Each structure stands twice: as C-alpha cells, then as structure tokens.
Amino acid sequence: MRQHTPLAAAALALLALLPAHAARIDTNAGLVDSKVITFNSYDGLIGTGPEDVGAEVGASVLFTSAPFTELGANARDLGENGLWGARGNPVDGLVDTPTGNGNFIASGFIGNSGELGFRFGSGVAGVGAYLNQFQIDGISNNFTVLAYGQSGNVLESFNVSVDTDWDGYNEGRFLGFQRAAADIYGFGVAGNGIVLDNLSFTTAVPEPESYALLLAGLGVVGLLVRRRRAE
C-alpha cells in the first residue's frame, strides 16, 4: 500500500508560507457569530449615501451606492428571476424566507449600473449577503462581488450570474467571502437591477488547522490524479 503522508506534509508546509487568502462562499453557515443587517428599519429611502446602516447590530457600516438605489424596498419584480421581497402570506401559500420577512436594498435597473458598497469600521473575516438580479430572457446579465482591504484595494472578486425560476419567490443566493484574517474592510456588489438583503459579517476566522487541512487535502487529491495519469 502506498503512503502519501509526505505529500500531505509538503502541502501543509507550502500553505504555511501563503498569505491570507479569501475563499468564495455560497452559504452563511460558516460565518460564526455573525451580525446580520436586515434593513427592515428603512422604508423607501432613495439616495447615494453615505448612510450608516449598522445601528441595527451596534456596528459602524457605511453604505454608498449609485443613483436610484432604494434602501428599504419591499418588493421587486426580477423578470425571469421571479419575485423578490414580498412578505410571506399564508393565504397565498407563501412563507417567510431570509429575504421575505422585511425590507431590502434594490439598485437601479438596466442603464443605471453601479455598486452597492459597504465600508466597515473595523476589519471582518467573513462577509456576504443574499442576492439576486433582474434578468430578461435571452439577455445575459451578471454582477461582480468584491472584498476590499483597509486602503480600498480589491482583495478578491468574482463575477456571477444568478438564474432562478421565473415564477420563483425569493430564490436568490447567499454570496460572499471568508478569509483567514479579519482584513476585509469593504464589501461591494457591482451591476444593475440588483437586490440585496441580510448583509452578514463576522470577525471570527476559521480554525487554522481546519483551513490548512482542507486545502491540503484538495492539493493532495490533485497530485494523486496527475501521478496516476503519468503512470
């Protein structure tokens, strides 16, 4: 039987030399002890900010946006991506969802693209929000999710296109970042026709051992696959 322990040890040693890196996340499950801003205290405020939206969780979180953004919207038709933000109503067979129990943020539609930006008073290790976007059948549309450092530099970013049912109800996705250090000072979503709710963030970082072992395991699998192909 082959022993691959040396490969795992080598992967861990390399990881120890790497700088803190952000992992894209698609769930809020890993954001331990997170603070969640629901935006339910706002009702149709239209403007570009800055607006401190962090009072709900006792933190400083400055929000800025492009023109025609509504802070505290309560319903949006997202075209082919369904309906967003309507409150659950048992009579209609609807139930509360993470985005359906109050108000949210909605940016301008096509032609009014810009960025929904959040600036934290202190660094966070993980951040994300529930998101979706207006879609028209036959037209490709996407947006960019960004994490910023203390000086405003982009730490990480990715582009994504959300595709949900045309008759769906709050079928968005949770998207964000988790880093090995609390060095995220800004979070942004750039595009048009975007809806955002339940901004979540935490200063807790993943346990170093778990983080390293997870990445090392992925690296070892890759090495084994390449070795077997070579043989």
Image (cartoon, rainbow, N blue to C red):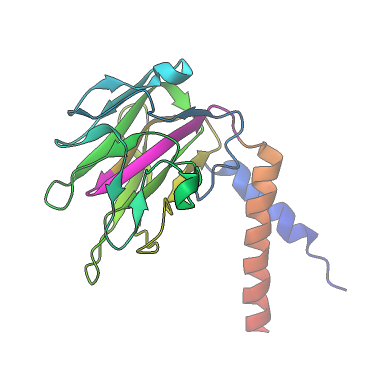
Say whether residue 116 is magenta: no
Camera-side residue: 126 or 174? 174
Quadrant of image for the C terminus:
bottom right
- 179 on left or right of 169: right
- Residue, far left: 111
Tell me which residue sits at (66%, 54%) in the image. 216
Residue at the image position 69 percent from the left and 54 percent from the top: 10
Would residue 196 be counted in the magenta stretch? yes
Q: Is residue 83 visible?
A: yes
Range covered by the magenta-colored residues: 190-205
Quadrant of the image occupied by residue 2: bottom right
Q: Residue at x 27, y 21 (%)?
A: 51
Query: What is the count of numbered marks?
Result: 0
Question: In front: 103, or 174?
Answer: 103
Left or right of 214, for residue 188: left
* Image coords of residue 149 (percent x, y): 37, 32
What residue occupies the far right of the structure in this picture?
1
